[in-house]
Amino acid sequence: MAAGRNKVLLFSKFTAFVALSRAALDEQGIPYEYLDGRTTNRQACVDRFQSDPACPIVLISLKAGGHR
């Protein structure tokens, strides 16, 4: 998806899955943003994801995304 210039929102309830996703993206050199309950400047993450064509993916924990 990222190679096709699509934007991807990846939501997960499981932090272990998000950690595996981060490791895979890091290994492949794919830039991304990451939001979880500890993220302090969420708007900066969202802004980068929305405006930077080089940042095709945002990983979001469900609780950080407002779902409980």
Image (tube, helix red, strand yellow):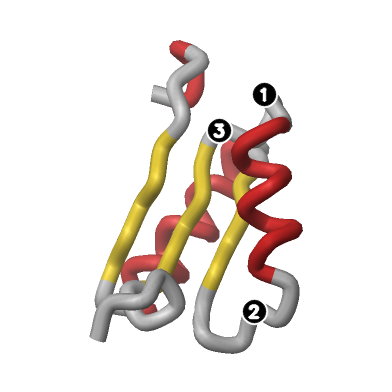
**Residue identifier under label 3:** 56
Label 1 element class: loop
Residue sitting at x 45%, y 77%: 64
Badge 1: how crowded within 10 Å, few (<14), some, or many (20+)?
A: few
Residue 43 vs residue 17, the one in the foreground: 43
Q: Is residue 8 above or below residue 13?
A: above
Horizontal side, residue 21 vs residue 17: left or right: right
Q: Three-letter amino acid code at disc 2?
A: Thr
User: Is disc 3 placed on a helix, strand or loop?
Assistant: loop
Of all residues, the one furthest to the top in this rendering is 4
Q: In the shown orientation, is residue 12 left or right of residue 52? A: left
Foreground residue among 61 and 22: 61
Q: Amino acid at mark 3?
A: Pro
Task: Looking at the image, tell me whether mark 2 or mark 1 is earlier in sequence order.
Answer: 2
Q: CA distance from mark 3 to mark 1?
A: 6 Å
Residue 45, image x, y percentages: 68, 57
Residue under the image location 58 percent in, 37 percent down: 28
Amino acid found under the numbered disc labelled 1: Pro
In the image, is residue 41 above or below residue 52? below
* Residue neighbourhood size for the residue with mark 2, other residues' Cα within 10 Å, grouped as few (<14), some (14–19), many (≥20): few
**Label 2 – label 3 distance at C-alpha:** 19 Å
Q: Which residue is mark 1?
A: 53
Q: Does 12 sit left or right of 30 as displayed? A: left
Marks 3/1 in contact by CB < 8 Å: the verdict is yes
Please give the residue where the numbered disc 2 appears in the rendered image.
Answer: 39
Q: Can residue 4 be seen in the rendering of this structure?
A: yes
Quadrant (top left/top right/bottom left/bottom right) for the C terminus? bottom left
- Mark toward the start of the polypeptide (2 vs 3): 2
Q: Of helix, strand and loop, which one carries label 2? A: loop
